[in-house]
Amino acid sequence: MKKKSLFLIILFVLILSVLLIAATKNQDPRLDKKTLSNSRSSSNEVISVKRTYEGPIYKKSNRQVEVLFVEDPGMPGFGTATKPDPQWIHYLDITLGSGNYDWWGPVVDSSDGPPVDTMALYDLVIWNCYDWWWSPCFAPTSGAVANMSTYMDGGGKVWFIGQDANYSFGPSFLTTFLTPYFEVQSVTDDVIWATNTVACQGENVLAGFAYGDSADFASNPFFPDEVIPTANGQQIIWDGQYHFNVITNDFRSSFWTVDGRICTPDSEFVAVVDSMLNLFSIGVAVEEKPITQDPKSFSLTAKTSNPTKGHTSISYSTAQNGKVSLKVYDGTGRLVRKLVDNVLEQAGTKTLYWDGKNDNHHPVAAGVYFIRLSMEGRTATKKMVIVR
């Protein structure tokens, strides 16, 4: 009897172990670890990273990653030679911080990209088609357009980048997708023919930016389209003659026909990407307003260009005596430099200089940083982007 009882116990434990393993395998990792699964079961289509908010300067959101970048690589030779695209990894690493976004792709030619339920996990989808002008259309596919439309109907935001996407897809692309979802009134294909470099200028909400944009596609230069928005949209990038890129007035979608490739100066396009993310209300949510009702009694300014090479003068004002702290945090919320640490100071305006180094006197890496002033329960925070 003892042997029989022992056998039954061992059998019960084995069955229970098998059931637990099976249950674990059947879990959807997107809902558990925020790791994307590809419905096409392709092991090389997804790069997944996890965002973690830490530190006192962040407002936690109900999920950890806000941005999904979709790399829809275009025709062979008509997109970035290295995949995943090192240029956009570079731009997003600096503006959002490495690991603070997810990546889907490179999408194979006939793929519809991420399904709607995957996109619904994110506030913003940046979908880059690079260049595809061949017929029939592959990038974006009809399924991809349908998925993006459904995602946007549900409140999602899309930054859609597609040289020749209008030509490739055909006349219905404007009427069924670009006009209702991106407030595009008209598109004139190839207003500039086969240029390797475009002198880009910001306008309207991106006024003041200027950079040279050089194509790095192996087999194709730029063929920019001119995009005219409806009254509910505005032009944001042009060359002084033709308008290439637009955004809706509610900042929920943007359509670009000239991608940011090899930009000079690089820091200028990084600033454009950062500004676009801010327009989409994407990035780390930071409390930037002091508690006091009088902004003159408690304020913080960083006197530098943004992005900066790391050298900046910082001014702050207080209307009363008290203990002041001024600290620099990186994009993950980690403290990197104590400029003023709980020091009793007289009321007034002070200016100091940050040399772009951490408390160990080593230069900090390129990326997003936050300067935080605190005094007697009041705080003010400024964001800055450092490029190297």
Image (cartoon, grey):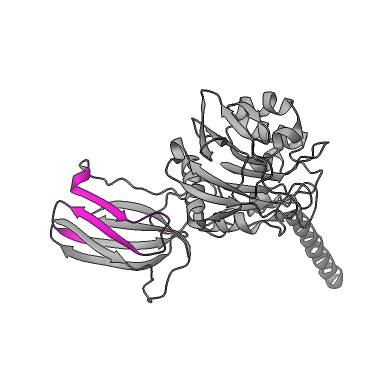
Q: Is residue 365 magenta?
A: no
Report the front residue among 189 and 84: 189
Q: Is residue 370 visible?
A: yes
Q: Is the N terminus in the top left, top right, bottom left or bottom right quadrant?
A: bottom right
Q: How many marks?
A: 0
Residue at (69% x, 38% y) in the render: 116
Q: Position of residue 124 (x, y in %)?
A: 57, 42
Q: Is residue 321 magenta?
A: yes
Residue at (55% x, 34% y) in the render: 246
Q: Position of residue 69 (x, y in %)?
A: 63, 48
Residue at (55% x, 60% y) in the render: 98
**Above or below, 339 relative to 137:** below
Residue 328 image-quadrant placement: bottom left
Residue at (86% x, 68% y) in the render: 4
Q: Which residues are magenta?
A: 295-323
Q: Position of residue 200 (x, y in %)?
A: 53, 45
Lateral position of residue 337 relative to residue 14, left or right: left
Residue 155 image-quadrant placement: top right
